[in-house]
Image (tube, rainbow, N blue to C red):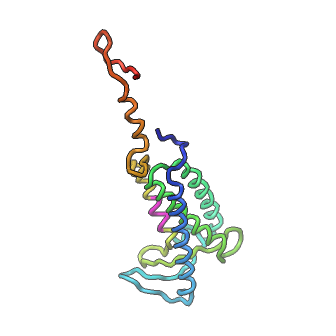
Amino acid sequence: MSERGAPSRHPWLIAGVALAVYALDQASKSWAVHRLSDGSTIDLVGSLRFNLAFNSGAAFSRGTGFGPLIALLAIGIVVVLIWTSRSSTGRLTSVAMGLVLGGAIGNLSDRLLREGPGGFLGGAVVDFIDLQWWPIFNIADSAVVVGGILLVLSAGFGLGRGEDDEGVPADASDAGAEDARERTVDGDGAPVDVDP
């Protein structure tokens, strides 16, 4: 039976998704800084465009000046995700954890390594995806949001929880153990379980 402290069945899936998100996020940010630093924008479809912005605050450019606090919170989230991912048994939950982990590390890297208002963890996060009716964001932000939604769905509705690689419930081998007992009746006709 699957236990809370059981090791993750998909550690490579979590790591692979996190690494892919991180690499895509950092590559896209590097491209945006090099291509859009002159103030130009690239119109794509409808209101979607690429428009470079630097965020030294919290999500969606709110809380300017709270960058170091946000970075410390992100470090805490990364530590908690790494710790809790050890017991992830479902593929959906593992993908969700990888998305959130990769996104959090992507934005945390900006706070650690990019220039900003200064100070400890004071770097600015590179944002460039601009819908013009929503705050500018990046791939890491998208991964965190999608991963968070998937985590809520998997926890709240049991989606992807406790499935092995074949989509069979992880505790299916234990489910039949109770049925394997012989059923008999006692002298009064009441059912009695007898182990074989």
Secondary structure, magenta segment, majority class: helix
Quick check: 127 above or below 43? Answer: above
Of residues 4 and 47, the one drawn nearer to the viewer in this rendering: 4
Q: How many numbered marks are there?
A: 0
Task: Determine the residue located farthest toward the left in the rendered image.
Answer: 189
Name which residue lies at 44% across and 63% down: 146
- The image quadrant where one finds the C terminus is top left
Residue 51 lies, in percent from the top left, at 49, 82
Residue 90 lies, in percent from the top left, at 45, 51
Q: Quadrant of residue 62?
A: bottom right
Q: Quadrant of residue 19?
A: bottom right
Name which residue lies at 65% across and 66% down: 68
Of residues 169 and 182, the one drawn nearer to the viewer in this rendering: 182
Residue 8 lies, in percent from the top left, at 52, 49
135 magenta-colored: no
Q: Answer with left or right where residue 49 lies relative to residue 38.
A: left
Task: Determine the residue located farthest toward the front in the rendered image.
Answer: 196
Q: Which residues are magenta?
A: 142-148
Residue 162 lies, in percent from the top left, at 43, 46
Task: Determine the residue located farthest toward the top in the rendered image.
Answer: 187
Quick check: 51 above or below 173? Answer: below
Of residues 59 and 20, the one drawn nearer to the viewer in this rendering: 20
Name which residue lies at 42% across and 77% down: 131
Quick check: 31 above or below 121? Answer: below
Name which residue lies at 41% across and 22% down: 195
